[in-house]
Amino acid sequence: MPMLKYFGLTALAAGLLFGAANRAPAQVAVEIGAPPVCPYGYYEVPPYNCAPDGYYGPEWFTGGVFIGAGPWFHGPHGFYGHVDHHFDYRHGYHGPLPARGEHPADHRAEFHGQAMHDEHGHEAPHGHR
């Protein structure tokens, strides 16, 4: 019996010693690179395909440069912009998409946004304007 008690205390001490050891978190480096060149902006979900004209509202652009999608966007906290779901491929849009590097049209009169999204694609809180 004393041998069993000695073995039990040794196992308990080893368990406490190894159980309390600090574990270092893994470090993972992901190289995202430069954003693709899309004339009207990007869908807010990977693989960030180019969105057609009229998908994003004018508040997603500054000086003609799209500022609102992808992991490279670090805009103001609480930013919400208008989005037209009719042009979203996840909601059934199968029309033409612009080619990367294509130049945007000079008009946005046909834009009719039905939703507001933040820079990560989350819907705005109810009643947000």
Image: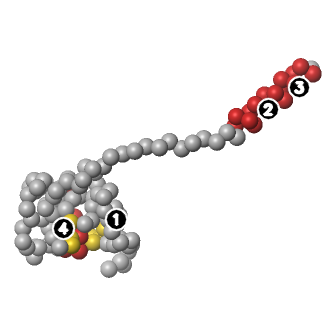
* Front in this rendered view, residue 38 or 111: 38
Residue at 7 percent of width and 73 percent of height: 107
> What is the number of the mark on residue 65?
4
The foreground one among 26 and 97 is 26
* Residue under pointer 2: 12
Q: Amino acid at mark 4?
A: Val
State the image coordinates of residue 114 (x, y, percent, origin top left).
24, 71
Locate the C terminus and report the quarter of the image it occupies: bottom left
The residue under label 1 is: 74
In this rendering, would 25 be left or right of 107?
Answer: right
Is there CB contact under 8 Å for labels 2 and 4?
Answer: no
What's the mark number on residue 47?
A: none
Of the numbered discs 2 and 3, the one sitting upstream in the chain is 3
Decide if residue 45 is on the left or right side of residue 5: left
Q: Earlier in the sequence, mark 3 or mark 1?
A: 3
Q: CA distance from mark 2 to mark 4?
A: 63 Å
Q: Is residue 129 above or below residue 65?
A: below
Q: What is the number of callouts on the image?
A: 4
The label nearer to you, 3 versus 1, is 1
- Which quarter of the rendered picture does the N terminus lie within? top right
How far apart are the alpha carbons under marks 3 and 4?
73 Å
Which of labels 2 and 1 is toward the front?
1
Which corner quadrant of the image does residue 91 belong to? bottom left
Q: Earlier in the sequence, mark 2 or mark 4?
A: 2
The earlier-in-sequence mark between 3 and 4 is: 3
Asked whether the beta carbons under mark 3 and mark 1 sit within 8 Å of each other, the answer is no
